[in-house]
Amino acid sequence: MKPGRQAGAALLAAMLTVTLVATFAASAMWQQWRAIEVEIAERARIQSAWLLVGGLDWSRLILREDSIARSGDGTDNLTEPWSMPLQEARLSTFLAANRNVAQVEDASTDTANAFLSGQIIDQQGLLNLYNLVNDGQVDDIALRQFTRLFEYLGLPRQHLNTLARNMLQAQTPPRAGGDAGDLALLPQSVSQLGWWGLPQQTVDALAPYVTLLPARTKVNLNTAGAVVLWASAAGLDMADAQRLVQARDNSHFRSEADAAKLVGNPAGITGTTHTVSSSYFEVQGRLRLDSAVVEERSLVFKQRGQASTLWRRRGATWSTASAGRP
């Protein structure tokens, strides 16, 4: 081989070697960068989750203190601290309010870029699907309430029949020797009603007005919207329901009799179907840490001197509708 050709072959081999080395180096750097990004994202997610746990504890403390203090008259209403939504705020502002600490001196937890928001919603301001069954049969009063709501929303009656049938199956234990497969699985929330074959459009339409709690409940006259009040009280028209909402904005109801007296309809609003206090609340929290966003919903049961978490669901999208729903 001539010297010129040998030199050209050597140069080509050197160029190929350099290209190969550069490719391997770039691939190694990319793998390292990707590993670092994954670690940063996972760290942010875990930090956000733990910070939301603290937010839930804070909400429970608010509800616990409310159960002790109440408002002096034993009611739950929209003038109390728990009903005020928390708009997105920098987490360090909360720390600054505690012993004037502006930032935690910990490199692993950068609260300067953490933003917290959330709200507490009274679940007894909604119609409870669990009420559809009582003593092993469909409850007539609850069925009338949901019939009015379905008619108002323009939803098919067969969808209500599906709800009532599945709720009855879910709450009725199988007979001795019966087939346990006949039981319907009871969802934890309204968003899971698709388990029972309901179309998503129907679930979305019901979501602002109904809830699914683990026990029978009454409608809180101090927190329910006009549509829920109208649907829950037989003989009540929408004008009366809106008048109830306007009246309680000025002064909350201290008893069911106060509301019944206002609309002159004592038969439709009684202690059997309505109340002025609540035990079930949904806590919705959202924490944004850099590019990571973690959302959480929790159901809290409040009783005298105690507030316990019944379930928590992380990562689900939650609505921004407050207790002042339509």
Image: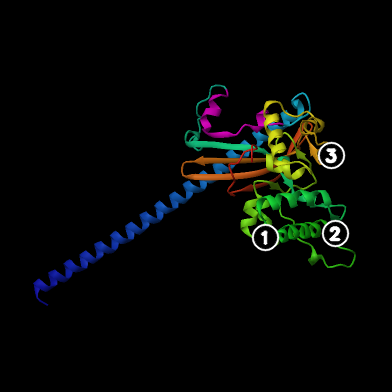
Using the image as rendered, state which of residue 77 and residue 226 is in the foreground. Answer: 226
Badge 2 amino acid: Pro
Q: CA distance from mark 1 to mark 2?
A: 23 Å
Q: CA distance from mark 2 to mark 3?
A: 34 Å
Q: How is the image coloured?
A: rainbow
Picture quarter with the N terminus: bottom left
Q: Which class describes the residues within 10 Å of circle 1: few (<14), some (14-19), or many (20+)?
A: some
The residue identified by callout 1 is: 198
Say which of marks 2 and 3 sits in front: 3
Say which of marks 1 and 2 sits in front: 1
Say which of marks 1 and 3 sits in front: 3
The residue identified by callout 2 is: 173
Percent across and percent down for residue 325 are: 64, 40
- Up the image or down, 252 lies above or below 274; here it is above
Q: CA distance from mark 1 to mark 3?
A: 33 Å
Magenta range is 77-98
